[in-house]
Every structure is written in C-alpha cells, then in structure tokens.
Amino acid sequence: CTLVLQIGQGGNPKAYYRRGHARAHLGEFQGALEDLRASAAASPSDAGTRKELARVEALYREHREKEKRSFGGLFAKMSQQEKDREEKEEARKKALAEQEAKLEQERQKKQAEERKKQAEERKIKYEEEQAAKKAREEEEEAKAKETAEAAAPAVAGGGGAENEGEQLAKQSAEVAKPPPEAKPPVVQTEGRWTPMSFTPPPRTAEQEMQAQTQEIIEKLNKGDGTGPPRNFKQMASVTQEPEPVDYE
C-alpha cells in the first residue's frame, strides 16, 4: 500500500484503507487514523471506511486511557519519591542549621567566659598596681615626714647648733654654778645691827675647774662675732665670697 501511494496513486482510497487497517493491528494508532481519515475523505460514501475509522478511534482512546493509567501511577510514584527526597533534604538542612547554631552558641559562650576571665585578671592586676602605688606613696610620705622632723630643729629658732649650744651652756652653768657665799652674821650693837667681818673660804680644785668651763662656754656662745659660728646665718655671714675669675 505504501508503494502504491508512492508511485503516484495518492488518491487511492483502498490503499489508505488497507494501510490504516494494518497499522491499527500493529498498534500504530496515530498512523492508522491518518490513513483511514484520508480514505474516508477520498470515498465519503464508503460505510466500511467510516466503520473502521470509528473502531480505530475507539481503540486509540482505550490505548490512551490505559497508557495514562500506567504512566499516571509511575508519575505518582516518582512524585512521591521526589517529595520524600525533598523532605529528607529539608530535614538534613534543618539538622545542619541546628548543629551550626549550637556550635555558634558554644563559641559565643566560650568567648564570653574568656572575656570575663580577662576582665577579672585585669581587675586583679589593677588592684595590685594600686596597692603597690599606695605602699610606695606611704613609704615616701613616711620618709618625707622623717626628713621634715629631722630638719625641723635646724630651722626653728635660728638653727639646731645654737639651741644645742644654749642648752649645753645652761646645763654647764647649772653644774658650774658656785655655791652661794655665806653672808656674814649680823650682830646688834647699841641699838643697831652691824655685820660682822667674814672671809669666804678658798675655792676647791673642782670649783676652779667648773668656773673655767663656764667661762669657755660663755665665750663660745657669744653673739658678737668673736666666737665660732653657731648657725647657718652666722656661717653665711663669716664665709667670704671667692674672687671673680677673668676668663678672658
């Protein structure tokens, strides 16, 4: 039939009919329908052609329904598998996100603990530095106070040497002070009192030594410039300035 149609008898309704009938038996329903429709168009009054066309159309519809049922189940199964795969992927991504969030939380917690530890260490170091600084200040203040207390006698009252000299002179004067001379007894004659003649006893060697010591101390304590300087003011007054040097 195909050869007849190729030779040139394209309008032969029997050739289309027989080839359409053969294609329908082979399961080529689309080709069979094309040939039967061409035969019916070439011979509209042929009832057999119309009957065969109706039969093949029914077979083709049945084939389509069957194919749809078969592939529909396959598509549904594939769709379910795809859905399951997507759910598994979503669960995997969710578990991974939860694990990453947990690791991030642990990392932040560790960083917070490290910052807290560093802050405590800085606080302890600062307190130790402040304590050491306070101890140094107290030590310097105590040293300054001792220095001031040691320098106070030299400043007050014109110098410590002068005060010490005066105290030494006073003590020596008290030691070297001669005993009071005995007053002559008084006798009453003719209604009045008349002192009797009295000769003081001679001084002993100890009294002579005390008198000489008192004399030396009085000379040392003189303020007229004849004695040695007793304070810084007198030292400054008796110290001579050096002669100027001509550097030219």
Image (cartoon, helix red, strand yellow):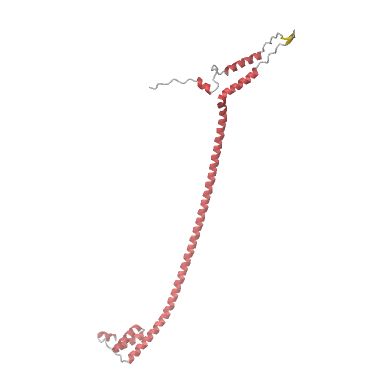
Horizontal side, residue 225 vs residue 13: left or right: right
Q: Is residue 200 above or below residue 33?
A: above
The mark total stands at 0
Residue farthest to the front, as pictured: 191
Among the 4 quarters of the image, the one containing residue 181: top right
Horizontal side, residue 151 vs residue 44: left or right: right
Q: Position of residue 50 (x, y in %)?
A: 34, 90
Q: Is residue 141 above or below residue 8?
A: above
Residue at the (44%, 76%) spot, across then down = 76
Q: Quadrant of the C terminus?
A: top left
Q: Position of residue 48 (x, y in %)?
A: 33, 91
Q: Quadrant of the N terminus?
A: bottom left
Residue at the (61%, 20%) spot, across then down = 169
**Is residue 28 in view from this perspective?**
no
Residue farthest to the top, as pictured: 190
Residue 190 or residue 101, whichever sits in front? 190
Q: Position of residue 205 (x, y in %)?
A: 66, 13
Q: Is residue 62 above or below residue 177?
A: below
Residue at the (45%, 75%) spot, across then down = 77
Among the 4 quarters of the image, the one containing residue 37: bottom left
Residue at the (44%, 74%) spot, across then down = 79
**Is residue 164 in view from this perspective?**
yes
Q: Is residue 85 above or below residue 152?
A: below
Residue farthest to the left, as pictured: 8
Q: Position of residue 63 (x, y in %)?
A: 39, 83
